[in-house]
Structure formats: C-alpha cells, structure tokens
Amino acid sequence: MKEVTKEVLIDASNRLLFTMSDSEFNLLLEEFEIIKKQMDLMGHIEGVDDVEPMTFPYEVEVSYLREDSPKEVISKEEALKNAKNVKDGQIKLPKVV
Amino acid sequence: MSILDLTIKEIHEALVNKEIKVSDLVKESLERAKNNKDNAFEIILEEEALKKAYELDKLEVEKDNYLFGIPFALKDNFSTKDIETTASSNILNGYIPLFNATVVNKLLDKKAILIGKTTLDELAMGGTGTSGHKGITFNPYDKTHTHLIGGSSSGSAVSVSDAITPFSIGSDTGDSVRKPASNAGLVGFKPTWGRISRFGLFPFAPSLDHVAYFTRSSFDAAILLNTLAGRDEHDSTSSFKEVEDYTHFDEKIKGKTFALIKEINESIKDEVLTNKFNELINKIKEKGGIIKEVNFDTKLLNAIYPSYIVISSSEATSNNANLDGIKFGPNYGGNTYQEVMFNARTNGFSNLIKRRFVIGSYSLMRENQQETFLRAQKVRRLIVNRLNEILEECDFVIALASPSVAPKINESSDKLSETYLIADNYLAMANFGGEPSITIPLGFKDDLPFGVNITSKIFSERKLLSVVSEIEELTGLRNLSTKTYKREDK
C-alpha cells in the first residue's frame, strides 16, 4: 500500500477534481493515522483474502433485457434548464482548441 | 392532545370520522414546521401543501387509504419535480429536478401531502447531522441544543419526533435512519435492499443505499411499506418479489428465537441502557420468546466500520462524479472545462465531504485496491455470511441500537475502541447484507431517548413488523414524540 503522505492525498484529491486548503490536508493526514489503523483491522481476519469480494447484498439474477425503446423523453429546454451557461440551445464551455 | 400528535392509523380514523379536515391538519403541520427551532427543513412547501389540502377537503375521505391527506416530510436527497433539491450541499444549490423519485410519486398518488424537504448531512455522507450546508440540525428533546440528533436523515427525524408530521422519508446507507431513530425516540425502518425503488434517490453508495423511513409505530411502518414496496422498471435493482400485505400482523413473540450477539452486548457499557435492554429481554422471555446468546467474531465486528467507510467512500467518488457545475449547480467559471469542474467541486463541496472522497480515492488507487477496496468487499462477504448463519438459526437479532443516548455536539470518542467500532457502527451489517432492520424506542436517560434494533432475514418484513408490534407493547413507547413524552412526564 502507498504510504500516506500529503503529496499522496493531494494526488488523490486532484484525481477527483478538487483541492483543499493546506490546513485541511494536514487535518486529513492526522485523521489518516486512525483510518489506517482501522483499515489494518480488515487484514486481521483469518482467511479474508480467500473469499470473493461481495459487490451487492445478495445474488440478484436478472435474466431478461428490456426493449430499448424511448419512453419518457425530456425536451431540450428541460435538459438545459439547470445549466448556468447556455448559448444557442447548447451548454457553453471554454474553448478546447 | 392534537390529532396531529397521533399515529397515521389514528389520524386516518379521525379524518374518516370527520373529526378534522385535511386542511386543518396540514395547517397545523405547517405551523409546527415553521415554529420548529431545530433546523429541520431545507424548504417548507406551504402554498403547495395548502392548495392540495383544500382540494382534498372537497373529496370524501378514502376509507381504505390510510395515507389520504396525511402530511409528510421528505429528505432533500430525493428528487422532486420543480422543487429545488440540494442534498444539503452547496454544489447543488439551485438544482431543480425534472421528475419525482418513485417513492414520491407513490405517496402523492395515495394523496399524502408533502409539507417540506428536510436537512441532512451533506449528500447523506455523515452520521451527525452537523455537515449540511444549513448548519447543525438539533435534537428536539434537548431545547438547549447541546445534543445531536444524528444523521444523515436528521431533519426527517426531527419532523416525526417533534410531531410535525406522523411520518417522513429518509435514506439509510450505514444506519442513517436507524441511528437517528434511536436518538430521537422513533421507529426507524429500513426494509430489504431492493424492496423499495431507489429511482430518484441521489446515489451515495448504491450497493448499500436503501430507502428508509421514520414513523411512530410499527403498524404505520407497515402501512408505508404497503405503498412503497414493489418492482420499478426505473430501478433495475428493485425486486420482482411479490408485495405482501405488511399490515397483516399474525406473527407473535411466542416461539420465536432472538439472537443476542455477545460481542455487541459486551461493547455497550452504559448501565442505564443495558439494564433497560435486559428488562426487555426478560419480558420477551415471559411472552414465550426464546433467547439465544451467540458469538459473532470480534475481528469481524471490528472490521465493519473500516470496510463500510472504504466501500461507501469509494462508491461515492464515482457516484458524485456528475456534480461538475456544468449541467447543474453553481458555475464558478474557469479557463478550461477541467477548470470549470475543478472550481465547482472545490467551492461546492464542504471540507468534510472532500475528506471522505479522498479516503475513497486513496482506496481505489491501483497500488492500494487489494488491501483496501477489494479487501473491504471480502470482509463484507464474511460479515454477511456470519449474519445469515445466525439468521438461519434464529428469527431475529436484537441489540441496543446505540451505545448511548444522543451524544453532545463535537463530543469526541476513541475511534479504535470496541464501543465505537462495534456498538456505534454494527448497524451497517444490515446494509452489507440488505436485511430488513428496525429501530424502536426503548427508554430514556436524562430525558433523552434511546432505542433497540431488531433485524431479520431478507424479505421477512411482515414477520418482523408483526413481532415488533408486540415488542412495542412491552416497551410501552408506541407513538412517542416530544408532545406525548412531555404529557406523560407531567
């Protein structure tokens, strides 16, 4: 496992597209001392790595595919209603090139 | 006593008997919502609720519809068409959904009346009720505002415990309804994962998220499940399993086996709470219940919280990737589209939520995944296996819902102690396995309530609610709220 340093935490936050203040990173670094100890508890369980990861509470088998037909369609105006920067019926973003 | 202080079932009878009009009921509910000082509401929908109430006044009360004209509150992480929905996060300020969550449509179809949307821990990611963008939500049992109500379904808990509404909707990913229910003296019920559609609920950690709710009796919880349960083609994880009549209470304590998990009991040190719990266990025995003490495995129980935090934070990072300030939410500008997103997320999320996201991001790093995310999912399997083994031998698991009454705001605790790791966090195991799980009020300490939790096998809601109804008779705390508690106290 990666050692938890301030740089690693900054990298982790950048991957999620946000940053925090210096003092927040320091606070999180302190919190990680406890978090790491808590995470270690997962490794104390005998045979833990011998089972398959569980991704849902119980096995759900769905053996059909629904028809791929449009049902409730929203209008263009509705789709753009919550965007703050709209021009000519499209969401406007800074130029890429 | 006001009719609004009664349970759904009793209010319904009063409406049928013309003892009260829907508009008078709703007016009082709105007045109480406006006068409440616990920071429970994101928005109070006075105009809309009154309009609906006057419409219902003109109709005959539907005798077979318990929810006709009943006011309710909704956690602000459920989509409501044309009503701002922020999940108590600044990144969603001004966001107005285009559709209703399925549970909202089902309740409105039954002519229940939405009076307001309630505060929560930001994006439902917290258990204290202190991290929403409107500040701390307080416990109505403590007028000094010293104690938490807990979260994340904080405002919904206030709404029912302060008798503003007889029920409210919340969501439960780790214990976000069942823990505040303990702090607020309420019935907090999370049915089986898949039993209720989650379409329109803002996802936090979908493998653990449940629609859940607060009421003041198990019968009311059954009334709601009759309406809310069922397959929804908008939610592929909703179950096809047949919906039963959950109000048909024909199961009794007699002959049922209750598992007492030794390690959970031993991790709770407060004598007032444990004495009250032991009293209840004796009463269950007197009613013919069979009590069986079982060992779970301390190492597994100690690992519930870390595996919960790893799984939920990791799932949350991807589920909240759509919050980018472009399609909705405040736009803080930027020179590139990446900067637009970066600025929106930096300004829109609070520091607490960012720290949770960073834990998720760290857990998902390729170098860490084996020992964090994947291991947490393996721990989850072992915990669920053990819980299900116990539920094969016993009908129910019963334990105090919390090691204490509502903690003080900013009270610190030892995050590596068994009291914290086990007693304070074991409820998440029913999110891991999706089992139906209910908290009901058990007693008081220093005028603050605390609850007991009962969990059963997946899709056994009818049996659970039926037996819990008999347990309510043993606790004597059916229909508890600040209104009824004060009355008894005097």
Image (cartoon, rainbow, N blue to C red):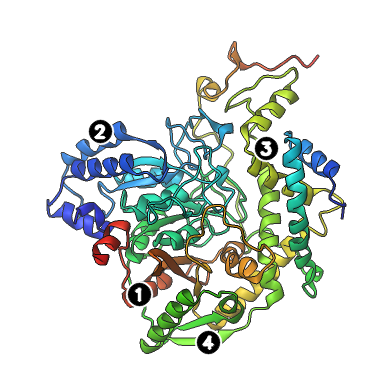
Q: Earlier in the sequence, mark 2 or mark 3?
A: 2
Residue type at the position of mark 3: Ala
The furthest residue to the top: A88
Q: In the displayed structure, would residue B383 be above or below residue B341?
A: below
* Image position, residue B33 (x, y; %): 32, 42
Residue type at the position of mark 1: Thr
Left or right of B193? Residue B70 is left
Q: In the rendering, which numbered label is found on residue B292?
A: 4
Give the Cα separation between the discs numbered 4 and 1: 20 Å
Please state which of residues B376 and B130 is positioned toward the viewer in this rendering: B130
* Image position, residue B479 (x, y; %): 30, 63
Q: In the rendering, which numbered label is found on residue B475?
A: 1
| Mark 1 vs mark 3: in front | 1
Q: Earlier in the sequence, mark 4 or mark 3?
A: 4
Q: Are marks 1 and 3 on the same chain?
A: yes
Q: Residues within 10 Å of mark 2 (few under 14, many from 20)?
A: few
Q: Is residue B71 visible?
A: yes
Q: Residues within 10 Å of mark 4 (few under 14, many from 20)?
A: some
Q: In the displayed structure, would residue B111 be above or below residue A46?
A: above
Please state which of residues B442 and B229 is positioned toward the viewer in this rendering: B442
Quadrant of residue B64 in the image? bottom left
| Residue ID for mark 3 | B321
Q: Residue at x 70, y 61 (%)?
A: B306
Give the Cα separation between the discs numbered 1 and 3: 45 Å
Residue type at the position of mark 2: Lys
Give the Cα separation between the discs numbered 4 and 3: 46 Å
In the picture, the quarter occupied by the N terminus of chain B is: bottom left
Give the Cα separation between the discs numbered 2 and 3: 38 Å
The furthest residue to the left: B18
| Residue ID for mark 2 | B51
